Structures are given as structure tokens and as C-alpha cells.
Amino acid sequence: MTSPTLRLWAWPLALGLLTVSGLLSALVSEHWGDAWSWLALGGPVLVMAWHGWRTPRC
């Protein structure tokens, strides 16, 4: 059983942690960190684009 708070904040927290890990990886590492930062920062952008291009159900 999951709490309503966890259900509400699970995805925003996951996207936030993904973004923070991508930013830190881009700052402090080379080669593999560059690849991870592209993936980690591109994920939230893709999620936002997907939600922006969906047609609303009215």
C-alpha cells in the first residue's frame, strides 16, 4: 500500500534526483560522466516534451 504523498511526489523527486546527478556528473567527471550527464539531463526534457505535446482530454 502506498501513501497519497508518495504517489504524488514520486515522479517529481525522481526527475529532480536525475537532474541533480546529471549536473554534478557534468561538473566533476570526464568521458563517462559526459555521457551520463547527457542522458540524465535529457530524460526530464523528454518527459516535459511528452507531457507538453499530449492532447488534453476535455
Image (cartoon, grey):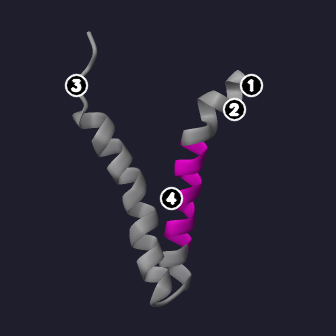
The three-letter code of the residue at mark 4 reads: Thr
Q: In the rendered image, which quarter is residue 24 located in?
A: bottom right
Q: Residues within 10 Å of mark 4 (few under 14, many from 20)?
A: many
The residue stretch that appears in magenta: 12-24
Residue at 37% in and 61% down: 42
Query: Considering the image in quadrants, where does the N terminus appear?
Result: top right
Predominant SS along the magenta part:
helix
Which residue shows up at 50% across the image and 68% down it? 23
Q: Residue furthest right?
A: 1
The three-letter code of the residue at mark 2 reads Leu
Q: Which of the marked residues, 1 or 3, is nearer the chain's N terminus?
A: 1
Estimate the spatial distance between the alpha carbons at disc 4 and disc 1, rounded to whole Å. 25 Å
- Is mark 4 in CB contact (under 8 Å) with mark 2? no
Q: What is the x, y in percent for residue 12?
A: 55, 41
**Badge 2 local density, few (<14 within 10 Å), some, or many (20+)?**
few
Q: Helix or strand or loop: what does disc 2 sit on? A: helix
Residue occupied by mark 1: 3
Q: For marks 4 and 1, give the one nearer the viewer.
A: 1
The image quadrant that residue 28 belongs to is bottom right
Question: Is residue 21 found inside the magenta-colored segment of the image?
Answer: yes
Lateral position of residue 44 relative to residue 6, left or right: left
- The residue that mark 2 highlights is 6
Mark 4 = which residue?
Answer: 19
